[in-house]
Image: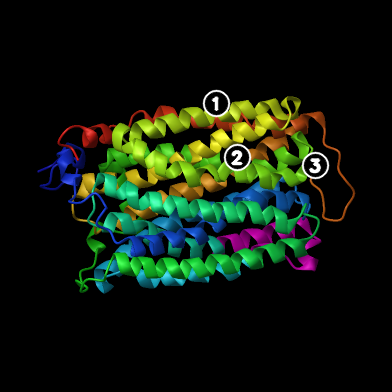
Amino acid sequence: MNAATGSEAPLPDERAPAAVADAGDGAEVPRPALVRYALGSAGMGVYVTVPGLLLLYFLTDTLGVTPWLAGLALLVPKAVDIVLHPYVGSLSDRERARRGSRLRLLTAGCALAPAFVALFAVPGPVADRPWAAALWVAAWFVVANALFAAYQVPYLATPTDMEIGYHGRTRVLSFRMVVLTVGILVGGALAPLLAGEGDSVGRYVVMALVLGVFTVVFQYVGVGGVRDLLPAPAPTGKAVDRHGPALAQVRDVLRRNRPFRVLVSCYLLVSTTTHLVLAGLPYYARHELDRPGFTTVLMAAFVAPALLTTPLWFRLSRTWGKQRCLLLCQGFFAAGALGLAAGKTAGLVVPVLCTLVLGVCFAGLQLFPFSMVPDTVRAADGDETGRTGAYTGVWTATEATGAAAGPYLYSAALALGGYAAARAGGEEVTQSGGAHTAILLGFTLLPALLMAAALAVQSRYRLDAELTRPGGV
């Protein structure tokens, strides 16, 4: 008996790497179904981008909420996700065991759009009171995050549920990454244009309505793609209660699966860094480059390279492996973030070029960790994917935590620097020298340090070397 787990099975880390080498490299997956599945990420891309890019700025520079309270209004809802996502993952596993698919939960998540609009549709009497406005945004953020989890968790479980191998999972996720990039680009480019310079709540509501329609349409397309990729088997009727409550499953998958634990720890830092950069973009464009409208340009430079580089990263990973490519992305991202410290003194070319470097790296930072999650699940459980939702729930909770921690860290930097909040339609606020320093260092030095820490943690990941050695895949 295994002393560590109390079972007859060996520890997952002791299993032969070949156990995860499923038949097929993904080339046999029907392209039309794969494209429909990937299109579901377009709507997801909008939601993961727009709140991260504009919500903090909306609170501080439109609703007049002080930075510390604005950061708290975004942090608390995401703290709820730490419990919510693993619960949704557990529920997703039960749905698959009892009904043969995760589609019912996935479809429920398509109600995200109205909650997304409500985030920005702050009524006049509420908007007049900063603390009430912060409470309104926080409450609707909880609702929207819950609906997003209902869609995201079963959606991301799909590559693990499929019977494909190491490179096949990267292929499936590369399709998803390209479409996700389109969604991020649509959200990141259109949202600032539609919202203008944040001079009215009404402009934000129009923005949310337009992008909300975009989101729900592609969510429904994604549901059809999942249905085509995973035709529902006959329900087994077996419950997965033997794995225990959701939080117990979180503890179990982290304790038993060291590669997954390392990957989660690293991705927490990566997610925190990328969301910090998103939150800081409007401040950097307005106060350091003196060009408020340049947010759209920088956002496009940050996201657009993924459309071209994702297929290249996939091809490179077939030779180098995912781990080496991921470490390369992390190292160059840290360097690019430091380059942005030049600000307007180097003209506009240097910030744009550095942002392009971040964008090239961002593609790999999304592609490789997400395609490595199924590797760690298969390494632990072989062909038994009855707990895929539990793993995915932990993973998406990690991403949500980073999505909250990034803006919160940036808001904390602003608060320490004495950044002055402003109301829509009010007079222009002049920021102090300390505020400008906080805006710049929070956007450059802080993400560089966080990504360097992520690189150090990721260097402890050993599974990829085992899977890519001769006979391992």
Question: Which badge, 1 or 3, is on the more N-terminal residue?
Answer: 1
Rendering coords of residue 354 (x, y %): 60, 31
Magenta stretch: residue 133 in it? yes
Q: Of 301 and 50, which appears nearest the observer? A: 301
- Tell me how the rendering is colored: rainbow
Q: Amino acid at mark 2?
A: Val
Mark on residue 335? 1
- Give the left or right position of residue 60, taking residue 351 as reference: right
Number of residues whose C-alpha sits closer than 10 Å to that of mark 1, classed few (under 14), some (14–19) or many (20 or more) = many
Mark on residue 420? 3
Q: Which SS class for mark 3?
A: loop
At x 75%, y 30%, the residue is 344
CB-based contact (under 8 Å), mark 2 and mark 3: no
Q: Which residue is mark 2?
A: 277
The correct choice, above or below, for 113 with respect to 181 in the image is below
Tell me the chief SS of the magenta region: helix
Number of residues whose C-alpha sits closer than 10 Å to that of mark 2, classed few (under 14), some (14–19) or many (20 or more) = many
Question: Which badge, 2 or 3, is on the more N-terminal residue?
Answer: 2
The correct choice, above or below, for 154 with respect to 406 in the image is below
Q: Quadrant of the N terminus?
A: top left
At x 67%, y 44%, the residue is 297
Q: Nearer the viewer, mark 2 or mark 3?
A: 2
Residue 248: tell me if it is visible. no
Rendering coords of residue 119 (x, y %): 65, 63
